[in-house]
Every structure is written in C-alpha cells, then in structure tokens.
Amino acid sequence: MICCLNPDCPHPLNSDDKEFCQTCNTPLVTLLRNRFRIIRVLSDEGGFGRTYLAEDLDKLNERCVIKQLAPKFQDSWALSKAMDLFHKEAQRLQQLGENPHIPTLLAYFEENNYLYLVQQFIDGQNLLKELQQKKSYSPKEIRDILLDLLPVLKFIHERGVIHRDIKPQNIIRRKSDGRLCLIDFGSSKQLTAKVQIQMGTSIGSHGYSAIEQIRDGKAYPASDLFSLGATCFHLLTGISPFKLWTENGYAWVQDWRQYLKNPINDDLAEVIDKLLKKDVRQRYQSAEQVLKDLFDKQKLSPGEQKTNLSVILPLPQPTHLSRKYTLLRNLFLFCSVVLLLLLGNFFYRQSRWLQLSISSNFEQSKNNSAPKYSPVSAGNFYLAYTFKLPDEPVLAVATTPDGKTIVTSSSNTMKMWSLTTSQEICTLKGHTNRVNLIAITPDGQTLISSSEDKTVKVWNLARGQEIRTLEGNFKSVNNLAISPDGKTLAISDDNKIQLWNLITGELIHTLVTDYSSGTRKVPLAYSPDGQVLVSSDRNKTIKVWNVAKGKIIRTWKENSQAATSLAIADDGKTLIAGSYDKRITLWNLDTGEKIHTLAGHAGKINVITTTPDGHILASGSSDKTIKLWNLKTKTEIRTLTGHSGAVESLAFSQDGKILVSVGVDKTIKIWRQ
C-alpha cells in the first residue's frame, strides 16, 4: 500500500499500482527522500500536518515515525513562525535524543513544499492501552512509574524544555526492556503556545494539564509534574481526569482519594497530593524534589524511624526565571569570583553569601565545619570546592556521562552528589564492609560497586536501588572495568579475571592468570572498541586479551615495579601504565614496545585517567598531588596541589572541564577550568 501525503486526504491508503490518490487525486510518493516508505497515518496534528509510521530502507526497513508540517495559516508571520518552531523541534529532539528514554532524531528535510521530521519508533505499548488491559495499577507499580519518568523529566527540564502534554498516551513501555519512554515533544503544542495564544487556545490536554496551562497559556516544570500526578491518578483509579475535569473543573484534585478502589499507603498519597496541587506555588517545583520525597519515604514504615537515606536538595528556583536573567546572573557570579581573586581575603570574608549563591556548600555532618570555596588558580584548572567527609578515607569516585552527578565510596556506603547544585542526593547502602571500587556504565544508568565483603553489586543509578548481587564466589576483588558499550563487566579476582554480562548478570568468560593470590591491585583497561582487555599483575607482566575468545594475544614485562593503573589512549594503539616506581609508561599496544616514560611524581602512582577527548592525562599519587599531562607532546602541563594525603581516585566530566579527586584525607575536591 502507498499512503497519500496530502494532510487533508480522508482516505490516504492506496494500492501499490496507483500513481495518483484514488480519493484526492494527489500524486503519490513511493519513497520520501528516496529512503522512507510511508505505511500509514498515526495521527493528525490539529491542522499542522500529520504523523506517519514509516520504514527506513537505509536501515533494513527499520520502522520510524515521520512528522509532517503542513500548517493551514494564511498569515505569513504565523507560517514563518510555524516553520521556525518545527525546526526548533528537530533541534530539541537532536538534543534530547541523547537520553535513551526519548526518541532519537533520524532526519530533517523539506520535500514537495512540506517539512518532515523523522524520529525513532519506540516499539511498545502506551500506558493507556496497558491500563485498558490491566484495569488499574498497584501502588508499587505507580511508584516504579514515577521512578522511571522523573529522571527523564529532570533531564528535559534542565535543558529548558517543558513537555506540556504528559498523559498515559504519551508514555510507552518499550518491549525490549520494559522501561518507560516519553514521546511527543510536538511543535504543535509550542505553536499553540506561541502563535495562537492571543486567540485563547488552550495548551495540553484537559484534565491532565495544570490550570496555568489551560487558563494562562504558561507552562513550567511544575506544570509537567501536575500532568504526571494526573497520569498516576488515572492509572491508579482507571478514571480519566478529562471526565472529572469536564464535570467538576479542578475541584476533583482536592478529593482525588475518594475515587480510589483500594486504599494506598500514606507516603505515596502524600506525593500525589503535592503533585496535584492546583496552585503552582504549592506544587513540587522540580523532579528532584519528588525524587527526594520518594527516596525519603521509601525508608519509612509505620512505627519506624527515618533511616539514614540522606537526600538533601537545593531550594526550588522560581519557575518563571528567564534564560536571559539566568545568563546575567551567572555572568555576575563569575565576575564576583574574579573580584575575590584580585581583592584577597578581605572580600572573601565579606562575600560568603556568594558561596551560597553558587551552591558551593555541601551539607556537612554535625561534626564538620562548612566546606570551603577555594578559587585558587592552578593554570586552566582551579580548586573550586573542597568537601570534608566525617567517615573513612574516600577510596573511589565516578562521574555520570552528563557530568552532573558524581558517586563516591567511603566506608561501606556510596554517596551520590549533584555537581550542578553541589548537594548530596542520596546514600546507597547494601554492602557490609568497605567499598573499594565503583564504576558507572557509559549510558549513566548503572553503577557497579565492589566491597571487602567479597560481593559485587549492580545498582540502578536513577532510582538509587540495588538491582542484583553477582554470584561469583569472589575472594579478593581488586579491580573493575566496564566495556565501552556498557554490556560487559570485567572483574579481577584472586588469580582470574571474570567477564560478566551486565544485562543478564551471567558469567561469560573466566580468564585464568598466573599472578598469586592476595595481590593488592590488578589494573584493567578496555580498548575503545571493546575488543581488547589489558591487565597487569604484580609479577610485572602486561597481558593483552581477546575479549570475544577469552585468549591472550600477547604479553610483555613492565618496568622494575608493577603497574597500579592502566588506560588506553583514544587511538586504541597506546597503553598508558602508572606504576609503583613513580613513573608513567606509554607502550605500543600492538608490539609491546616502550614509547615514552613520564616522570615527576615523588610517590607511587595510584590512579591515571584521560579526558574523554584523549588529549589530557591526569595522574594521582601518594605524594598528595595530581599531575596533568599533554599526551600529544608527552609533557607535564601542571601540578594540582591541595590534598593532605594520597590521591586515590580521579574522574573527568564528559566535557573534560571538571576533574574530581578523592583521597585518604577524607575529602572530595572539584577542579574546574
């Protein structure tokens, strides 16, 4: 069948042998852009065009969704605005498509005087159809839905996007993994808001949309949260908010509990209460605030006291803050910091309010003083924040790919911190002994931790919940490495290296080594393509493994002392090894030949890591310093000082502009450039 692309055609499907539509006589297009075959109409966009289901011939007939812009405006300004907003929708999808729970932009083009936007097709069932089969959802299922969607809303809101139309129809449960995806970031909603607001046209879907959207044509992050609350109500009760809105306006939100078929626990009810507040000022202002309450309440039960799940989030910011004001405020803050540098300690003491305004004060324990804001220049990097922890030394740190969250391990717990707000998000508990190693998958969804309790645990980072404990009968786990595709975990344990499938939690390979039991550290590193794994042992031998076959490709002897940390340059051909002998050695990974030696540390190298672009190497040492090296010129750039003890772990943000260091001095240090 060939689908007619005339947006006004009432019966667009035609047989393959037709050249003109049998209904409207429009010439039929077999392939859009010689690539996309239209299968059928998915929806009409209210006078702006249509949305189609199609096949992408360039991707083995993989299904995709094509949105067509064909607005019926007589006014040239409105038409120009429509085209501009449609273009911005494409840009928005290109940006937001980085999130695995939002459709990816595949193409954007003009053909036959229409604009087309092609996006990923999410194979699954929306929650409205799921509800029609289930009849209602349990409180636990509602909580899981909130925990799945709130990180997605946090993601889009941080990028200045308000969805405006959250409802069960726009939430799809993906067949492949059961996770929820948010769809329909349509320009028609933006168009209504910006082009037709003077005509009094409402925005969003009645019943699901907050009063400020329907009445004033304004939408904030809190507006999306109201829609999320209305969605939860619909799924809990099976009653459409549109029906209640038609009969009672917004009165139903005050007495929504009367429609419950079965009682729910007070904790969840209180969260939904606040999501459904009619007054936007009384509602949750951010997805982070909702997550905070959910994490807090997760640990509460009748008669029990609150446990130590610590979720400390910043005060809500005004939702109407303009982007221009935000830029001016940030510029002012930057200039103020420069003044602090120039005018010295006097202005520093007089300007402690500035520290608060840029959220540089992590919540401290009752036994510690406030953190210090330290704009001490270190070349292009300066020491921005120092956070003192009351526990044992901080042994490991990892950053999420978006550079907004870090995870640290100390004692038998891990803590999540927001780099955006400089606040502690939550504490992860589950291990019974000291957590030595942590790693985050490239998609930022999963955290791996290893402890002296001889367990390796897998965590859902968005929810802060343990997924599973790997059943490996581990004896002495001393290193972790995650493959670039995030699917395989390498664990060095005693005299072997185990490769685990992170999706299923199953053991794939066991690579037997000849290093003796009890070795302190066996560094591991994956090649950028994930096909090669490199290990080193205290016998001063480097081994290069074929991951797929589980076989050794080559081995060679190292320096006079064994390596403590490994990294592979982004060219996939250079191995970088820091060692006990205070040096960093560059090796040719194909031949095992030494390329160069970097010297300068006065103590053993504990950790090395490179920026994502592979240009800069950072090394942390027992000499209490961090050195930055130019990998192209193989020279030292600068030395960062500030730790009062050995530097144990380092992590760069994805853009390479933030470096996080932790050490035995019980501090976390944030370096910025």
Image (tube, rainbow, N blue to C red):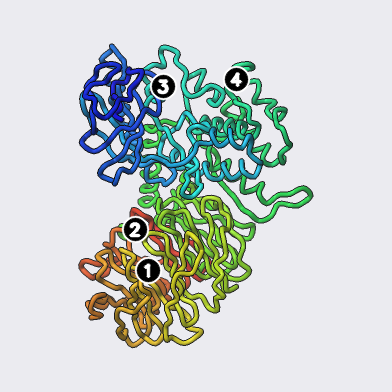
| Circles 3 and 4 in contact, beta carbons < 8 Å | no
Q: Earlier in the sequence, mark 2 or mark 4?
A: 4
Percent position (x, y) of residue 394? Answer: 52, 67
Type of the residue with mark 4: Trp
Type of the residue with mark 3: Ala
| Circles 1 and 4 in contact, beta carbons < 8 Å | no
Residue 412, compared with residue 364, is above or below; it is: below
- Name the front one of labels 3 and 2: 3
- Name the front one of labels 3 and 4: 4
Q: Earlier in the sequence, mark 3 or mark 2?
A: 3
| Circles 2 and 1 in contact, beta carbons < 8 Å | no
Q: Which residue is mark 1?
A: 626
Type of the residue with mark 2: Phe
Q: Nearer the viewer, residue 501 or 577?
A: 501
How far apart are labels 2 and 4 at the CA level? 55 Å
Q: Which residue is mark 2?
A: 381
Q: From the image, which quarter does the C terminus lie in?
A: bottom left
Residue 296, compared with residue 553, is above or below; it is: above
Disc 1: CA contacts within 10 A as few (<14), some (14-19) or many (>=20): many
Q: Residue at x 31, y 38 (%)?
A: 55
Q: Which secondary structure, mark 4?
A: helix
| Circles 3 and 2 in contact, beta carbons < 8 Å | no
How far apart are labels 1 and 4 at the CA level? 61 Å
Residue 354, compared with residue 515, is above or below; it is: above
| Circles 2 and 4 in contact, beta carbons < 8 Å | no
How far apart are labels 2 and 1 at the CA level? 11 Å
Disc 3: CA contacts within 10 A as few (<14), some (14-19) or many (>=20): many
Q: Earlier in the sequence, mark 3 or mark 4?
A: 3
Q: Earlier in the sequence, mark 1 or mark 4?
A: 4
Q: Which residue is mark 3?
A: 193
Q: Which residue is mark 4?
A: 245
Q: From the image, which quarter does the N terminus lie in?
A: top left
